[in-house]
């Protein structure tokens, strides 16, 4: 019992540390997009190293899944889940991406 409690605490602290200073709130899709995506996809989702995302035909769920699970058929960095993007972040980012036109 004790050991498990410690383990849970340890994993909790470790994953917080991996995410950076504070978990990003779900409302911060735009801000998270800017820090985590815009270098490759452009600040307006117009595309850069990565393809344009504005007007994408993907659903918000598809986008969120790509971010949290990755897709083996995709090129890096999307073969794997993106580092430091929680499920909540991914949903918020995906909703923001869907607002880009
Ligand atoms: C290091 C550069 C890089 C970063 C950072 C990055 N992407 Fe990408 N992204 C790419 C590349 C390259 C592709 C094309 C992959 C392919 O087609 O195989 C892509 C593809 C995608 C696609 C699929 C587009 C389509 O039409 O199939 C989505 C959605 C996407 N990225 C969203 C995001 C979001 C949201 C973030 C931020 C959380 C992000 N990406 C961060 C480079 C990046």
Image: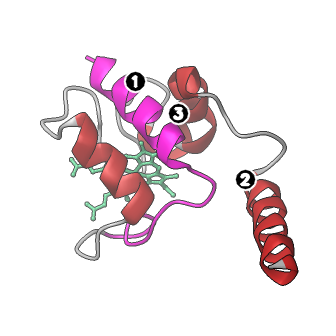
Report how far apart the C-alphas of labels 1 and 3 lie in the structure: 8 Å
Ligand 1 has an atom within 8 Å of the beta carbon of the residue at disc 2: no
Report if the beta carbon of the residue with label 1 is closer than 8 angstroms to ligand 1.
Answer: no
Query: Ligand 1 closer than 8 Å to the CB at disc 3?
Result: yes
Numbered badge on residue 19:
2
Which quadrant of the rendered structure holds the C terminus? top left
Name the side, left or right, on which 37 lies relative to 5.
left
The residue that label 1 is drawn on is: 96
x and y percent of residue 75 in the render? 33, 70
Residue 40 position within the rendered picture, expressed as x and y whole percent measured from the top left:
48, 47
Q: Which residue is labeled 3 in the image?
A: 33
By what rule are the colours in the image chosen? secondary structure
Taking the image as drawn, is residue 98 in sight? yes
Residue 33 included in the magenta stretch of the image: no
Give the residue drawn at x 42%, y 69%.
76
Give the x, y percent position of residue 83. 60, 61
Mark sitting earlier along the chain (1/3): 3
When asked about the image quadrant of residue 5, the answer is: bottom right
Q: Where 38 sits versus 82, above or below?
A: above
Residue drawn 27% across and 28% down? Answer: 54
Residue at point 26%, 35% (across, down):
60
Mark 3 element type: helix
């Amino acid at each position: 019992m004790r050991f498990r409690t410690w383990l849970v605490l340890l994993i909790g602290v470790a994953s917080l540390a991996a995410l950076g200073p504070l978990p990003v709130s779900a409302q911060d899709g735009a801000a998270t997009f800017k820090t985590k995506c815009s270098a490759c996809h452009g600040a307006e989702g117009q595309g850069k190293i990565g393809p344009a995302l504005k007007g994408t035909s993907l659903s918000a769920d598809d986008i969120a899944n790509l971010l949290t699970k990755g897709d083996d058929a995709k090129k890096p960095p999307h073969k794997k889940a993106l580092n430091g993007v929680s499920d909540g972040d991914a949903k918020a980012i995906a909703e923001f991406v869907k607002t880009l036109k």
